[in-house]
Image: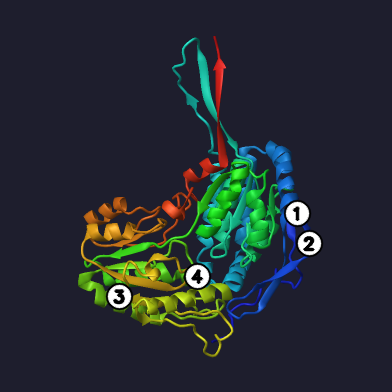
Amino acid sequence: MNAPIVQPPAFLDGRPKKLLIGGKWVEAASGKTFNTINPSTGNVLAELAQGGTEDIDRAVKAARAAFEGPWRKFKPHDRQEILLKLADLVDRHFDQFTLLDALEMGEPITRRRNARRRVLGLIRYYAGMATNLHGETVENSAPGGDFVTYTLKEPVGVVGAIVPWNGPMVSWIWKLGPVLATGCTAIYKPSEEASLSALLLADLLTQTGLPEGVVNIVTGHGHEAGAALAAHPDVDKIAFTGSVETGQKILQASIGNLKRVTLELGGKSPDIVFADVDMDLAVPGAAMACFGNTGQVCSAGTRLFVEDKIYDEFTERVAAFSRTLNVGDALEAETQIGPIVSQKQLDRVSRYLDIGRDEGARVLSGGARLTDEGRADGYFIPPTVFGDVQDEMRIAREEIFGPVVSTLRFSDIEEVAKRANRTSFGLGSGVWTRDVGKAHYLAKALRAGSVWINCYQMMDPAMPFGGYKMSGYGRESGTAQFDDYLNVKSVWIRTA
């Protein structure tokens, strides 16, 4: 492996990182810290404050004070200006964000750099929405007098946002944007496995003129800081992205004050390939639908359904393509597939490789951890293609969250639609065909929040993203997202 193409950013200055509460950088009340690890090397990157229940309580109080205080006086245009200033700051510091995500969660730096347009587009989209949120006048049929009726849309209040490690930058903005656009305040708990870009973003926010306490950030472990945030009686809404198991715990914790909850959870997304496809387009498209970001994507196309007529050729071509992908240190220019994020996740993915073999699936490529020179200390698993997979196998039913695709045969469109929907998840889905009739049929038949046709994992700030069934509810991006950050108030005025 070659030397990394970049040096660590100045943000990693060797000093322990602190919590942002009420506009001040402070240590955790307990004085405890924990380390964040570079998955490409296994080395410690930084020491972070280990926030807990007391820190969450301080952050909630600061957010409540800001919500009821100076932030309430900010007009839509003022909130828009904050977001536009943030966009400019993120643009100027984008190389640092790129480095931090590559170092901390292993996303290849060349792939991360391509996210600039998407990240800045999201922030500026939310800035535009800040001045486009409004109620409506409503004609009523009330008897007994003349009434003017209208609705007001008001911020829901204090939001607790729990952000995952697999896409820290975009996930942060998906939850920060609507908070600032609507006039809410927030406490953010980033994943303990990817907190650095969140801390840098919080630091930039302090330079925008945002009042103290509007945005607070508490790093720490999910079972401590995350659980305390989900259960806090003065939090009005939780926005969570992560596992189904944690999402269920958050729902249980929300009962105390019936706080509003939105959940973006896991997936086992079907990607359906018909015999009429352009293989030069569909092979790399279907492969990277699973292998992108080392398979650590909730909507990854991990169940690859291929029509009988081309199954053998197509799966072999996917396997051959996977063998051409360069697996290595996230900072190397030629790296296309980075490491698994942590030892814990590496162990999980490795277990599923064993499960697939034990169930009788055939390994067409990959299938074992890479431990050769230059990769022995990191958490590397090559893109893995399983053939001859059956619907009942665990590798076809359970979310693996690694670069592992299960390929399955199908014969006709109605059969594959039923099998694709035979899952507890419903986040993403893909269809590859030249037949517009098949495309439209499956666009309606598939029970998933997104259907990508002759493409995969496309995103835009104006398009909503979210799931059906156990993949959660609520949406990120698009106008639909704002309904979960606003209360609707009805106003009646008797004019007679």
**Residue type, numbered disc 4:** Arg
Mark 4 Cα within 10 Å, few/some/many (few <14, many 20+)? some
Spatial separation of the CA atoms under disc 1 and disc 3 = 52 Å
Give the spatial CA distance, label 3 vs label 2.
Answer: 52 Å
Percent of width and height locating residue 394: 39, 69
Across and down, in percent, residue 282 comes to: 31, 69
In the picture, which quadrant includes the N terminus? bottom right
Residue type, mark 3 in image: Asp
Residue carrying label 4: 111
User: At numbered mark 4, what does the secondary structure look like: helix, strand or loop?
Assistant: helix
The secondary element bearing badge 2 is classed as: loop
Mark linked to residue 30: 2
x then y, percent, for residue 353: 43, 77
Judge the density around disc 2: few (<14), some (14-19), many (≥20) Cα neighbours within 10 Å. few
C-beta proximity under 8 Å, tags 2 and 1: yes
Q: CA distance from mark 4 to mark 1?
A: 38 Å
Residue at numbered disc 3: 388
